Amino acid sequence: MKIIENNETKGVLYMLSAQELATALNISNVRMKQILKDRNLDFLRKRENGKIFVPHSTVGILLKEKGQEIKPEILSNFILKGGTGKSVLNVNYSCWLAERSLNPILLIDLDGEACASNMLLKEQENLDNLVTIYEILKNNLQIKDYVRETKYPNLFILPARMKALKSERLAGGRNPKTLLRKHMKGLAQRFGSIIFDMPPTLNSLTVSALLTISKLVIPINSDIFSIESLYLTLDELKEYAEEYECSIPEYYILMNKFQSNTIASSEAYKEITKNFGDRLIPTQLKFSAQINNSVNNGKTIREGCARELRASFDEVASYITGTKNNQELAQ
Ligand SMILES: Nc1ncnc2c1ncn2[C@@H]1O[C@H](COP(=O)(O)OP(=O)(O)OP(=O)(O)O)[C@@H](O)[C@H]1O
Ligand SMILES: [Mg+2]
């Protein structure tokens, strides 16, 4: 899906130009515009060049009629190492997208520690009563029927709680290639992006999520263990992808808790640039007590951090959304 900057909303809109949609549907641009008009479907005209853009909902309707499916971006900040910032990044990235996207965003919490759920759910929500991935798997339910609103507009969540730990046992032995996909029907029509938050382990459930995502961000800290985990995570991913005949997701490496004045951070930076080149996101996120405090106070980076950090996070998030790497819609 192409992401464009819209001058009126200053937002990121998950939309295609009419020309791109016409190509995906194999019809002419003129015919495309006619269909939009006749059917009274939503589209957006960009003022300065008169080009029209088609939102997610319209793309979904038209592609479905052609027997094709719209593919939302499915993403995760994941690494096989605890504490590198996965949940903070997944939560903040989801909020960042939800603020800018015309389409709703969904975070699926697969971590029994429920860090993302605690940060995002409304205060009065009691985690004990909510349906989690555990009930979804156990009772063969569809995620789309159990997503909850979060305290942020346009952002929804399938929450987790301690019981989610049991879902790992429940999932054991099932085929990870189909395990989650079976429960994700209907999500593509509703959500522009889906973000998984996961514990730093490999089990049927997390492997299943990793085989589902189209984009992976690997957050590392500036220590030898993070770098070892980075290699391990990529190796494991390749092995699973081979075993289940899937392709590995497009991946990026993000240096989090970066301290430019330390030898550890500059050495880690050198090693990653040497071995991974343009996989490294050019902006680092500094180590900052403000991020830690904002997490403790249930706030996002935008709500709880100073301008410099907010700007760094904006750069990171814009990079991840892939204004640089537009995805093919119809495959
Ligand atoms: N840039 C940063 N500067 C300072 N503290 C940070 C930064 N990023 C994350 N943290 C802190 O690091 C801790 C771990 O973050 P987080 O819970 O997101 O990691 P995680 O990778 O999800 O951990 P787990 O593996 O346990 O799920 C939290 O206390 C968080 O506030
Ligand atoms: Mg976490």
Image (cartoon, rainbow, N blue to C red):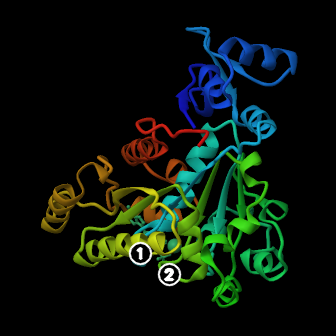
Q: Tell me where residue 237 appears, x and y as whole percent.
A: 43, 71
One can see residue 297 in this view? no
One can see residue 117 in this view? yes
Q: Residues within 10 Å of mark 2 (few under 14, many from 20)?
A: some
The image quadrant where one finds the C terminus is: top right
Q: Tell me where residue 282 appears, x and y as whole percent.
A: 29, 46
Q: Secondary structure at mark 1?
A: helix
Q: Which mark is residue 158?
A: none
Identify the amino acid type marked 1: Glu
Tell me whether circle 2 and circle 1 mark residues in contact (CB < 8 Å).
no
Q: Vertically, is 29 above or below 55?
A: above
Q: Quadrant of residue 37?
A: top right
Tell me which residue sits at (61%, 8%) in the image.
50
Tell me which residue sits at (73%, 62%) in the image.
184
Left or right: 269, with 23 as reference point: left
Q: Residues within 10 Å of mark 1 (few under 14, many from 20)?
A: few
Q: Secondary structure at mark 2?
A: loop
The image quadrant in which ligand 1 is located: bottom left
Left or right: 251, with 204 as reference point: left
- Identify which residue, 305 or 275, lies in the foreground: 275
Q: Quadrant of residue 108?
A: bottom right
Identify the amino acid type marked 2: Leu
Pointer 2 residue: 202
Left or right: 138, with 244 as reference point: right
Tell me which residue sits at (79%, 69%) in the image.
125
- Identify which residue, 264 or 216, lies in the foreground: 216
Pointer 1 residue: 239
Q: Tell me where residue 68 appears, x and y as whole percent.
A: 72, 42
Q: How many marks?
A: 2
Q: Tell me where residue 38 appears, x and y as whole percent.
A: 86, 16
Q: Would the CB of label 1 be found within 8 Å of ligand 1?
A: no
Q: Vertically, is 298 above or below 126?
A: above
